[in-house]
Image: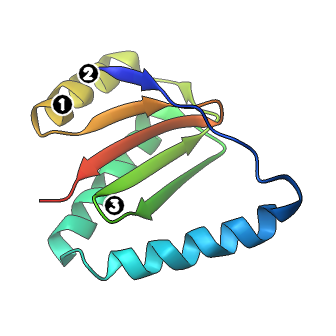
Amino acid sequence: MQERELETKSAGYYAYAAARDAAQRSYIASTHYTEQQKVRAERMKLALELVYSAKAVHINYRDRFIAIKLDRPTVRDRRNLAAMEGDWAAAGVVKRATAQGIIYRIPKK
């Protein structure tokens, strides 16, 4: 699976408003996904929680993809992670790294 670095910026003083806006946008975008797509994202989140130790794991629904973000992750099980990432790469899932953590993107079909 290919990993790419993303540049991110802190919201600083406006972090609370930015978090509320992101949650609202995620909810609005989630209405455009089927239950099957939502279940797939939830299963992927649970699988990631088994192989990573992270401060938090979030599912964010976007217009073109579902993002699963791991906040400050540490790998616990490299062998199973490699196997899962191989399967996910074949399914079109993309891995992105940021300063805050790792994001897996499930494309909308």
Image location of residue 68, percent across then percent down: 42, 50
Q: Which residue is mark 2?
A: 1
Three-letter amino acid code at disc 1?
Ala
Is label 1 in contact with label 2 (beta carbons under 8 Å)? yes
Three-letter amino acid code at disc 3?
Glu
Which residue is rendered at x = 26% and y = 28% of the image?
Answer: 85
For marks 2 and 3 on the same chain, the one whose residue lies earlier in the sequence: 2
Task: Using the numbered discs, state the Cα–Cα distance from disc 1 to disc 2 in whole angstroms.
Answer: 6 Å
Q: Is residue 8 left or right of residue 84?
A: right
Q: Secondary structure at mark 3?
A: helix
Mark 1, residues whose alpha carbon is within 10 Å: few (<14), some, or many (≥20)? some
Name the quadrant of the N terminus. Answer: top left
Q: Which residue is mark 1?
A: 89
For marks 1 and 3 on the same chain, the one whose residue lies earlier in the sequence: 3
Nearest to the observer: residue 81 or residue 2: 2
The numbered mark at residue 42 is 3
Image location of residue 45, percent across then percent down: 39, 51
Q: How many marks?
A: 3
Q: Is residue 86 left or right of residue 6?
A: left
Q: Is residue 96 left or right of residue 82?
A: right
Task: Using the numbered discs, state the Cα–Cα distance from disc 2 to disc 3 in whole angstroms.
Answer: 20 Å
Which residue is rendered at x = 36% and y = 32% of the image?
Answer: 95
Is label 1 in contact with label 3 (beta carbons under 8 Å)? no
Relative to 91, residue 68 above or below: below
Q: Is residue 108 left or right of residue 94?
A: left
Three-letter amino acid code at disc 2?
Met
